[in-house]
Amino acid sequence: MSHIDTTPLSTLTSTSRVCGAIRADVIHGAFAPGQRLKIAELAKRYSVSAIPVREALAQLEAEGLVQMSAHKGAIIRSIDARFVSNMYDLRSAIETMLIVRAARSIRREALMSLTATLDLYEAAGAKGDTMAMLSANRDFHRQINLAGDNEDAVRLLDQGWELIHALRHKFGYGPGRWQQISEDHRAVVAALEARDEAQAMALSDRHCAAARDDLLRQMANQ
Amino acid sequence: MSHIDTTPLSTLTSTSRVCGAIRADVIHGAFAPGQRLKIAELAKRYSVSAIPVREALAQLEAEGLVQMSAHKGAIIRSIDARFVSNMYDLRSAIETMLIVRAARSIRREALMSLTATLDLYEAAGAKGDTMAMLSANRDFHRQINLAGDNEDAVRLLDQGWELIHALRHKFGYGPGRWQQISEDHRAVVAALEARDEAQAMALSDRHCAAARDDLLRQMANQ
DNA sequence: AAGTGGTCTAGACCACCTT
DNA sequence: AGGTGGTCTAGACCACTTA
């Protein structure tokens, strides 16, 4: 009888669960923009105590979803066009910096892996498997970011991804956007193969701006 | 006798005090790179309990000084050339994005204020007042960043400033660096006045790279 | 001038890494 | 299995905001 299950009930912390829950609630409009979030209420709502709520709010502040000030608590940002536009511009600046560095140093194996990810993306697209496409898309960008060899920059982008994911989950993609992504990515790989920094930079800039404008259009159409 | 002093003993939180203390200790080498920081020890060292320490570590993780993982604790990063180089590259990408936006939209009054800050900087330089120069330098960049109209990007840069400040406090500036900064800033204002985005971008890139290389040289010379 | 609510402390709990 | 140490809960404390 020595085979006792020792699997942790949740390897995730309460903080991260609460973090995801608040993020989802904010994006789905459970709280009004500008509303003051009270720790005690949130603690009750998610059945935890004050500290995990505090720490979740701190993380969400880093993502930009709420603003905190000492002894004053948290208020939620409005997720409007300006917010989304600024967020994409910030991400674009970082991703473009990374892709230029990647163009200088990326290795043959990493390029092969990128191409494989692209194939995966298109296969998923052919089957209409949205989840797989989303995952391959993220994987593609993440590989390039990692090739840029600046772990703090990558961490920053990773940290904001959950928010992008949640927004895309709610608003979806515009018509033809999936194909455009595919074409852009092929061109990016070609530029990296050619070690053409300027071209990689230009493509990344355009790709990010197009992603931003697509999401803004989706938001404008509700 | 109704005039009782109701001033708070410390409007700062324990978290922020501990945060500054750990940052200073890390930069001055009180902990070895890669060392595991134990919350209980830190709590004792700074005479607070576990929670402020946890939250301070979380903030320092956002600054890049430590790495945390759930149920495993924090280890401190090594503040070496690669770390500093990557940090400056990241900041450069963000600042350059902001200056381009500033070049598009900056107002006459903001330009006047920039020039005034430049004069302040040079006056401080003439008197050899290092603190005033440092403060005017920061003010100059902050005004441009704010003109870029992306509050999250500005918050990110602000959040990393304490670290830059601490590093400069320890390593100082190279010979002639203060004059170079002054010249660069004059050129930047001229480009903004001319609304020359490309020039502003090029100057910002160069200025940031020069700052990075100056600090790296200072670190190499101890 | 009292109430509200964020912050901090002490201690319990439990995940993780030994032996 | 035991020990170490990070995480969470309950409650005290006190800064900030109303009237």
Image (cartoon, coloured by chain):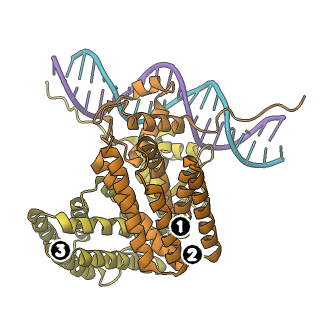
Chain colours: A yellow, B orange, C purple, D cyan
Q: Residue A187's quadrant in the figure?
A: bottom left
- State the SS at label 2: loop
Q: Chain of mark 1?
A: B
Q: Residues within 10 Å of mark 3 (few under 14, many from 20)?
A: some
Marks 3 & 1 on one chain: no
Q: How many marks?
A: 3
Q: Is residue A77 left or right of residue B36?
A: right
Q: Which residue is mark 1?
A: B144
Image point (23%, 36%), residue name: A7
Question: Is residue A218 in sight in this rendering?
Answer: no
Q: What number is the disc on residue B106?
A: 2
Residue A3, percent across and down? Answer: 14, 29
- Residue type at the position of mark 1: Ile
Residue A138 is situated, as x and y percent measured from the top left of the image, at: 26, 65
Q: Position of residue D15 (x, y in %)?
A: 67, 38
Classed neighbour count for the residue bearing mark 2: other residues with Cα under 10 Å, few (<14), some (14–19), many (≥20): some
Task: Determine the residue positioned at 30% across, 57% down.
Answer: A154
Secondary element type, mark 3: helix
- Whether pointer 3 and pointer 1 mark residues with C-beta atoms closer than 8 Å, the reply is no
Q: Please give the label number shown on residue A10.
A: none
